Image: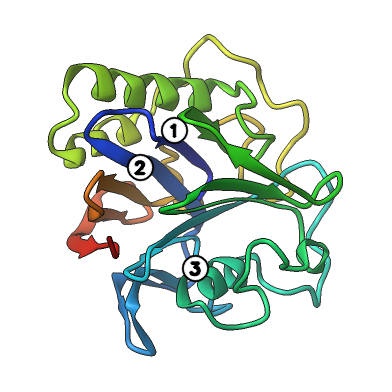
Amino acid sequence: MCVLAFAWDAHPSWALVMAGNRDELHDRPAAPLGRWPDAEHVIGGRDLQSGGSWLGVSEEGRFAVVTNLRGYGPPVPGRASRGALVADLLTGTGPHADARTADLTAFNPFNLIVADRQGALFMTNRPSPVRVRLGPGLYGLSNGALDEPWPKTVQLKAALLDWLLTDAGDPAALLDPLRQEHLPDFGQAPAVPSEIAQEPRQSPVFIRNPVYGTRCSSVVAIDRAGKGTIIERRFTPDGAPAGETRLAFAWPS
């Protein structure tokens, strides 16, 4: 997941809304959005190379999403998969299942947002481990710092704000701004290049590239009663739609 906009406790009807794109090498195997056979209370995609996930929800009342963090050199071999953080938090099992005590230094650089009925938490491990409680509001995240004003992040935050102010109906409408391929001329360009050779220093919300590009768009929306919708639209290496999944779920009251 390389760019997302996240609204927490920012609308009368919606407790949580997230819209984001996962950018990855197209040859990295992944399972589409669905219930996990080994943990049926978890709904999310799955990285079949590492076994973790980039985004998901749990019907036990949790949400988690992770992005890689740019600017600290190539990944160090042998470290735990960053997707394992998401998997452990959602399943409620494993060494990283408690966001308050998980060893953040065991991973290559990452950003993570985790939320439940009690609140939302932003976590990162560079330049040092940080856990920050998020207040009500709208946030943007890519592969830099939280709310770092990269053009695509600013653009997607603006689209989510517009939806919250003018529509806030079917969350599937947020899939449209996730297809933006125009790089806006506002915001602040990333200061450092990506460690992934195929990824340009600066990119639009939607990356159309046959080697490294947008693999899927995701929307999560949870209302005040805990009823939620999660949507995933997948894409081929040439950017054509390759399937869509929409699932309903509910958090405990």
Query: Above or below — where is 252 with respect to 35?
Result: above
**Which residue is identified by label 1?**
205
Question: Residue 91: x, y in percent?
Answer: 47, 77
* Residue in the picture at 38% in, 63% down: 61
Q: Which of 105 and 187 is in front in this view?
A: 105
Question: What secondary structure is marked by label 3?
Answer: loop
* Residue in the picture at 61% in, 21% down: 149
Q: Return the mark for residue 16.
A: 2
Judged from this view, the residue extending furthest toward the top is 186
**Which residue is identified by label 3?**
53
Amino acid tagged 1: Val
Tell me which numbered mark, 2 or 3, is placed earlier along the sequence: 2
Frontmost of labels 1 and 3 is 3
* Residue in the picture at 43% in, 72% down: 46
Amino acid tagged 3: Ser
Q: Which of 26 and 89 is in front in this view?
A: 89
Question: Residue 109: x, y in percent?
Answer: 75, 54
Query: Above or below — where is 207 with respect to 35?
Result: above
Q: Distance between the residues labelled 1 and 3?
A: 20 Å
Crowdedness near tag 3: few (<14), some (14–19) or many (≥20) residues, C-alpha within 10 Å: many
* Residue in the picture at 20% in, 40% down: 171
Q: Can residue 197 be seen in this view?
A: no
- The answer to whether marks 1 and 2 mark residues whose Cβ atoms lie closer than 8 Å is no
Query: Above or below — where is 157 with respect to 115?
Result: above
Crowdedness near tag 2: few (<14), some (14–19) or many (≥20) residues, C-alpha within 10 Å: many
- The answer to whether marks 1 and 3 mark residues whose Cβ atoms lie closer than 8 Å is no
Amino acid tagged 2: Leu
Question: Residue 53: x, y in percent?
Answer: 49, 68
Q: Quadrant of the C terminus?
A: bottom left
